[in-house]
Amino acid sequence: MFEGDRVMKGKRMTKPLGMLVFLFALWNVGLTLFHGWPSLWWLGLGVDFLLIVGIAELLGKMIPPAYAPLYRRSLSVSFPLLLFIAWELLVRGGVLSPDWFPPPSRIVQALWELITKFDEFSKTSLLGRPWLLPGAVWGNRPETVEELLAESHLYATLMRVFVGFFLGSIPGILLGMVMGVSPTIRTMIDATLSAFYVLPKIAIFPIMMLIFPDPFGEGPKIAVVAISVFFLVTINTMVGVRDIEPVYLEAGKNYGASGFRLFYHVILPGALPVVFAGLRLALGTALIVIIAVEFVRAKTGVGFLTFYYWEILSPEKMYAGLVVVMVLGVLLTAGLKKVEQWVMPWRRP
Amino acid sequence: MGIAPKIQASHISKVFSNGKCSVEALRDFSLEVKEGEFLCIVGPSGCGKSSFLRILAGLMPVSSGKLEIQSGEDQSRPLTSMVFQEYAVFPWKTVLENVAFGLQMRGIPKAERLSIAQGWIERVGLSKFIHAYPHQLSGGMKQRVGIARALANDPEILLMDEPLGALDAQTRTVLQEEILRIWEEQRKTVVYVTHSIEEAVLLGDRVVLMTAHPGTKKAEFPIPLSRPRDLKVTATPEFGKLTYTIWEALRGEVLSAMESTGEGCSKGIG
C-alpha cells in the first residue's frame, strides 16, 4: 500500500470514528438518564460491544504500521479491563446481584485478605504467611518453616500437582516411547490403555483412598493426579513416536544409527513436540483433578479454600479462590513453555 | 581397481504387499554402475526408482534377485550415503550437527568430525549458518545441508533421491551447478534419481530410463558430453538432441503412468 493512500484513508476515517465515539457516549448516557440499564442491560452491553468493535477496527486502520503490534497488544489488555469495569458498574447499579457476582473490587479485596490474613478457624492461610519466613528460618518465631508451609493452601496444591505430574509423566513418557517403537507391545496394551483413558480419573479417587494406609493423607490425592497424567502422556508420547516422518528414520539408519543411538538422535527429539503437547494437556488435567479432589476430601489446598468459602457463604472469597486457580494454571503453563523452549531450542519461537 | 562394476544389480524385483493387495515396484531390474560413474535414473513417478535407491541404501531388502556392491579397501568408509528428496535434515540439530551426523555415528572423534563438517559447510556456502537450525534456512539451503551431510560422510557411493525436486527452478539451477562442481572435484560413484531429463543429461555420464507399473529398465543413454561440464553445456545442440531423444522414449511411459494412477494400491511408491 502506498503511503499517500494510507494518509488519505486516515483522513477519511477520522469522521466516522468521531461519529462512533459520539454514538457510544450518547447511547450510554441516554440509557443511564432514562434508567434503562436494569431492564435493558443485555441490549446496552450488546450495542456497546458492537460500537467498541467498530471504534477499535477504525483505529486499527488509522494507526501507522510501526505501532500496529503495540496497538494490538494494548487492545488485548484493555478489553478484559473494560469487561471488569462493566461488571463492576453492573453490580453497583443493582443489575447483577453481588451475592452471585461480587464486583471485581471486592474480589481483589478478598484476595488481599486471603493473602495477608491467617484464618484462625481452619488454621490455614493462602500463601503460608511468607513474611514470617525469615523469622522462622532464624528460629526467633514460634512457627517453624514446616508449619508455615503446612498451613499454605497454595503450597499444598502446588506440591500435589508437581509430585503427581512427575510421578505420572515420567513412566508415561517411557511407556509411550516403548509402545511407539514396538508394535507388539503396542498391540498388547493399546486397547487396555484406551479403556482407561476414557475413564474419568476422579472416579478412582475412592479406590485410592481405600488402597492407601492414610485415606485422608497426601497419598491418594497425588496418586489420582499421577494416574490422570500418566494416561494422557503415554498416549501422546506413543502418537509422537509413530508420527515421526519416516524419512528421518531412513536418514538416521542410512547414516549408521541403530538401536539406542537411533532412539536418542532421531526418535526422542522427533517425538518431543507431541510429547510436550501431551504434557501441556496433562498439566491442565492435573489441575482439574486436584481441585476436584480438594473439594471432596482435603484440609488444605486451593480447591478446599474455594469450597470452604462456599460453605461459609463468602462469595468474594470463592471468586478469589478461582482467581488463584487461574493464576496457578497460567503460571504453570508458562513454566512448562519455558521448559519446552529449553529442551527444544530448535523450535520456532 | 578390479574389473567388477561398483554396483551390480541382477534381475531385482521388489513387491510391496499389505495383505489386501500387492504392488510390484520393480520387476527384473538389472543395472551396472562403474566406479566413479555419475548415473542418472529417469522415469515417471511411481516407477520404483526411489525403491531402487532405498534397496541400494540398505533401507529395504529385495524380494528377489541379486545385488552386489564392491566395497573399497578402506573398510571404515560407509558404503552409501543418501540425499533425500524431502531434505530430511534433522530439524533438532544445527547445521553443524547435521553435517557431522554420519561421522558421529561412525565414532569419529569430536574435534575431527567437526572440522570435516565445517569444511563441507564452507564448500556449500553455509558458513554463516553453521550454528543455525534448519527452520531458519530456506529450502535450497536445507538441501545444501543434506548434500553436505552426505559428502562429509565420504561414502563410496552417493545416492541422491530427487534432491532438487522440491526446489524452485532458479534454486535448482544453482544447486545443479554446485553438484557438478563438487562432483568434478570428487569423482564419486553417484546414483542420481530425478524426473527431470535436462537435469539427468546435465549431470550424468549415463541416463537409465525406467518404465512404471512395474518398474523395469526401458532404455539406456550414454551422455557423451565432455567433462568438466558446467551450465554452458545446456546451450549446445548436442544437449538439446539428447534431451529430446530421451523425452521421445519417455513420453509414452509418462502417458501410461498418468492413465494408471488412481489404482487403489499404486500410491506411495516412488
Image (tube, coloured by chain):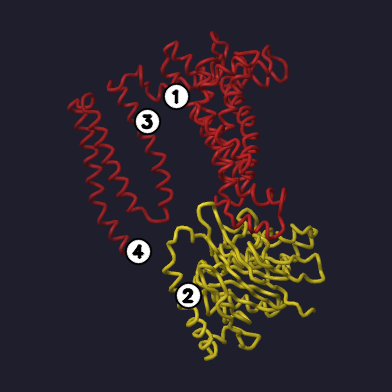
Chain colours: A red, B yellow
Q: Given the image, on which type of amino acid does mark 2 rest?
A: Glu
**CB within 8 Å, label 3 to label 4:** no
From the top left corner, tell me how far across and down residue A256 is, in percent. 72, 58
Query: In front: A255, or B124?
Result: A255
**Residue bearing the label numbered 4:** A1
Give the spatial CA distance, label 3 vs label 1.
12 Å
Separation of marks 3 and 4 at Cα, in angstroms:
38 Å
Q: Pick whichever of labels 3 and 1 is earlier in the sequence.
A: 3
- Closer-to-camera residue (B199/A36): B199
Q: CA gap, disc 4 to disc 2? A: 49 Å
User: Which residue does the image show at 31% across and 48% down from the upper left?
Assistant: A57
- Residue drawn where x is 54% and y is 8% of the image: A121
Callout 4 touching callout 1 (CB < 8 Å): no
Please provide percent x and percent y for residue A153: 56, 20
Chain of the residue on which disc 3 is drawn: A
Query: Are the residues tagged 3 and 2 within 8 Å (C-beta)?
Result: no
Which label's residue is closer to the chain start, 4 or 1? 4
Q: Is residue B230 left or right of residue B45?
A: right
Image coordinates for residue A269, horizontal then vertical, percent = 63, 48
Q: Which mark is residue A108?
A: 1
Q: Are marks 3 and 1 on the same chain?
A: yes
Q: Secondary structure at mark 1?
A: helix
The amino acid at mark 3 is: Phe
Find disc 2 in the rendering and name its residue. B253
Q: CA distance from mark 1 to mark 2?
A: 76 Å
Q: Chain of mark 2?
A: B
Residue at figure coordinates x 48%, y 29% from the top left: A326
Tag 1: residue type? Val
Number of residues whose C-alpha sits closer than 10 Å to that of mark 3, classed few (under 14), some (14–19) or many (20 or more): some
